[in-house]
Image: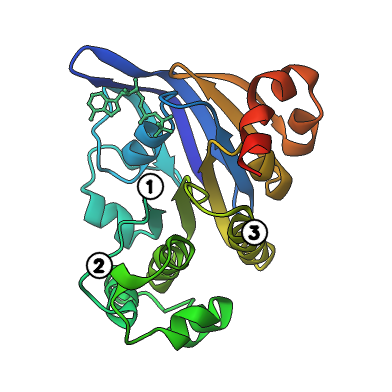
Amino acid sequence: MLEITDLQANYSGIQALRGVSLSVRQGEMVALIGPNGAGKSTLLNCVSGQIQPAGGSIKLDGIEVIGQNSWSVSRSGLLQVPEGRQVFAEMTVLENLQLGATALRGRPAVYPLSRVIELFPILGERRAQLAGSLSGGQQQMLAIGRALMGAPRLLLLDEPSLGLAPLVVKQVFATLRQLNQEGLTILLIEQNAKQALEVTGRAYVIEQGRIVHSGPSQELANDPEIEAHYLGQGAAAE
Ligand code: ATP
């Protein structure tokens, strides 16, 4: 479904991505893990059209995404849950969810409001509350719910575990896994390598703008080199 080839991105002289290639097949849940500043968010922002890459190709179902505006990318069902949730704090939970549905543009609502509330009952209970008054975990659920309202074909998540209590992380990841088992294709970007490898089928490791490892998540989780370098962070977060 998603085919990224030799992707390069720069910020005024800094090479953030140095020829990244990765793919996500329909129905897969794939992780991209790596330390701070490795280029994870840059990659995601290239895919969602928020950053123009310096080179390479990003194809969704064979169609080039580079050069498309972020709103036209979102209308093709490529929807991002941004780092730090970025909910609209002064709007209610319900209004935030309704905004997510604006990405539909005539496409059927695969995850209507009732389904989102079934997945995250707290959002139903707090529907009239301002989003800014929710806890971090509830805001993360709202950010995911908002993306689901736009009927993602491919859901991109940027560090959904950031700043959340371990129990809430488990809950959020369990819901993502459930969504994937129901057929949703997911690309999950995480510093919390341990938990990301537990819930995904395949993973890539990025470091200094380059993919340095890839393979089945379980194999990577059991690789002593990966464990030594990356799994300490996830373990520390627990
Ligand atoms: P984090 O987990 O901290 O978000 P990351 O893996 O997502 O890290 P990126 O945010 O993609 O990494 O950053 C990759 C590199 O690009 C880093 O060296 C970072 O300092 C740099 N960078 C990111 N955004 C900008 C920007 N807007 N301007 C200049 N440099 C940037």
Residue under the image location 42 percent in, 79 percent down: 109
Indicate which label's residue lies in the foreground, 1 or 2: 2
The numbered mark at residue 89 is 2
Identify the element where label 1 is drawn. loop
Q: What residue appears at the point 61 percent right and 31 percent down from the top-left corner? A: 233
* Residue 10 point in image, percent of width and height: 26, 20
Residue ID for mark 3: 167
Tag 3: amino acid = Leu
**Amino acid type of the residue tagged 1 in the rendering:** Glu
Q: Circle 1 is placed at which residue position?
A: 83
Inter-mark Cα distance, 1 to 2: 15 Å
Answer with the quarter of the image where residue 208 lies.
top left
Residue 148 percent across, percent down from the top left: 45, 69
Q: Residues within 10 Å of mark 1 (few under 14, many from 20)?
A: some
Instruction: Check contact, mark 3 vs mark 1: CB within 8 A.
Output: no
Please tell me whether residue 73 is drawn above or below residue 58 in the rendered image. Answer: below
Element type at marker 2? loop
* Element type at mark 3: helix
Residue 146 vs residue 180: left or right?
left
Q: Nearer the viewer, residue 89 or 94?
A: 89
In this rendering, position of residue 58 left or right of residue 88:
right
Query: Which image quarter holds the C terminus?
Result: top right
Q: Is mark 1 within 8 Å of ligand 1?
A: yes
Few, some or many residues within 10 Å of mark 3 (<14, 14–19, 20+): few
